[in-house]
Amino acid sequence: MIASTPPHLLLGLVFALVVIYYLANHVSRKRLPPSAPSTIPYYDHTRGFLEGGERLYSIMKAHAGSRIPIRFNLPGENVYLISSPELIRTTLYDSKSFFTHHARARFIQNVLGHSKAALQSIQNDTSGSAREPLPGSSTPANKRILRMQQVSTLDVISSTASMAEILRQFTRVYDEMLDESISRGGWVELRDLCGFMRHIGSAAVITAPCGPRLLRDCPGFLDAFWTFDQRVHFLHMALPIWLNPRAGRARAFCIDDVTEWRKGAVDMVKSAPRCIDDDMWNEIWGLKAMRLRNEMYVNFPEMDEYSRSDADLGILWASNDNLVPTIFTYIFAILRSPSLLARCKAEMDQARLPTDQSSGVADFDPLILIKHPLLKSVLNEVLRMKASSLIGRTAREDFHVGDYTIPKGSMALVSAHLEHMNKSLWETQPGAHNHPVEEPQWCGFIPFGLGYNMCPGRHFAVRAVLCTAARFVHRYEVVPQPHACGKWPEPEKNYKTFGYAICAPANVIPVLIRRIG
Ligand code: HEM
């Protein structure tokens, strides 16, 4: 039979067998994790990611606690949701398997609008941000921009000295602005406590790293900044800017202001070089880290004025976006419960420092505040319930999970909110058998991310929330408005910023406030 078969048919048969054998092996090794269900393939997932907010949350929430990665099909790429504690641990801790810089490059390109040349300098750096370059990287030492950003900025932000200074500046501005808005005397009506605290909080969070010049010389900056903040998801998705022109305008406005601020600092130092010493903070540059990062960019001519401003805007966004709503949510949680307020005040009193004679404001030691269990657990509970960041990493190589493979270059996402709401991890009722109470809870509580790229502002953030809350509740009395018959408004759930920031309430919180201390 074989002898009678024409040779070209035989060759074709052999070739087909080889292809089938190769495909069978290839496909079995690259079995992709299962896809999240959808009514219309590609459309549902793409719509969820493009729209973000509530819709993105709704397509992800069904998969909390999944032991295997779940695939979301998007045109041109797949994204994998990682949810089991063991996988979260690998994705966020193991920098040899997963790294951050694709997610970071995508953010600075789409959201901050980095120029192509500036972006290239980051994409070319395959060495990572740790002291030792990642294995296989050939990026020369003087082109390790990620490492230099880490050393000049992120390490400085998280250092003890810098944190103490940024906290001092933050509380000073916060107090001054509160004083200006609510002087001693009778009750003042506030239409929206959350909006009020957002304005004061962000002014303080911006002045602390940048000094007073940015907000003083650019009065429209704060409004443009929050307009930009609300549109970060739209920008992240790289949709045509004409679909949301306010997003582009707000970003351009912020970048122009930051550029003026930085040029101003450089000019002032040029005309009076002695005015800058090695202080951790001064009125020209604000925090030393802001000056150091500008000097660092001298090694990177491709980082032009605007790209440096984009990068600075990124730092301001990272510091405001989560911290400001956390402060409101924490204080509101305490105010709403008279018994909790009394117990928290008692713990705060144990951290009390001598009252500042010039301002008359009660002061508190942050190092003692953070050790008090009730104050800390209220904060952890606020972060557990409201933090919503999607923490992104990229697979450096094909990554195998059981029979499945996450292909090299794919984006893996960990959702802080889904982990924090995962009943099998947190509840003590039947069904929570995955987490015996005797065992430590690894990777279930991740408001600040995990691993080497964990949030560098976390220590400052915890101190800032507790100090602000202690000063606020000792200085002000806040009650619901009379027409609410003594009832506090219930904060409405709001997933608008899902994936990025603490979920602030959707509704306004009208109150009466008066100074008591
Ligand atoms: C409640 C407050 C905050 C929360 C919940 C929060 C959360 C986070 C999360 C989840 C990440 C990603 C971490 C990862 O990839 O593993 C992050 C990164 C970052 N955070 Fe925070 N953050 C807060 C406050 C701050 C503050 C106050 C600052 C600045 C002083 C800050 C600066 C940053 C920066 C610069 C990054 C990027 C780090 C990098 O690219 O490696 N954050 N934050």
Image (cartoon, grey):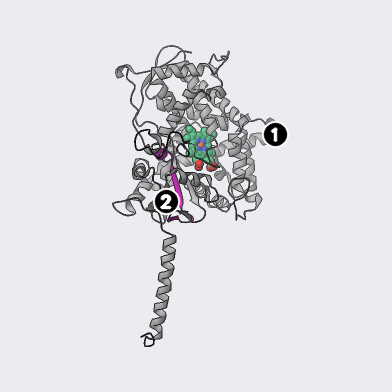
Task: Judge whether 159 appears above or below 178 on screen.
Answer: below
Q: Residue, x 40% and y 17% (percent of image)?
A: 339
Outermost residue on the top side: it is 185
Residue 219 lies, in percent from the top left, at 49, 31
Q: Which residues are magenta?
A: 401-420
The crowding category of the residue bearing disc 2, from other C-alpha atoms within 10 Å (few below 14, some 14 to 19, many at least 20), is many
Report whether 503 appears left or right of 166: left
Identify which amino acid the numbered label 1 is placed on. Pro
Q: Which mark is residue 273?
A: 1
**Magenta stretch encompasses residue 413:** yes
Residue 405, can we see it? yes
Location of residue 223 (image quadrant) = top left
Query: Marks 1/2: CA distance?
Result: 50 Å
Residue 60 lies, in percent from the top left, at 36, 44
Q: Residue, x 38% and y 86% (percent of image)?
A: 6
Q: Which mark is residue 441?
A: none
**Magenta stretch encompasses residue 443:** no
Task: Judge whether 352 appears above or below 272 on screen.
Answer: above
Q: Check disc 1 and report its element: helix, strand or loop.
A: helix
Q: Which residue is mark 2?
A: 79
Report whether 479 appears left or right of 151: left
Outermost residue on the left side: it is 39
Q: Nearer the viewer, residue 22 or 232?
A: 22
Question: What number of labels is visible?
Answer: 2
Q: Residue, x 48% and y 22% (percent of image)?
A: 469
Location of residue 502 (image quadrant) = top left
Q: Nearer the viewer, residue 253 or 334?
A: 334
Q: Check disc 2 and report its element: helix, strand or loop.
A: strand
Task: Judge whether 514 appears above or below 113 on screen.
Answer: above
Residue 104 lies, in percent from the top left, at 51, 46
Identify which amino acid the numbered label 2 is placed on. Val
Mark 2 close to ligand 1, CB under 8 Å: no
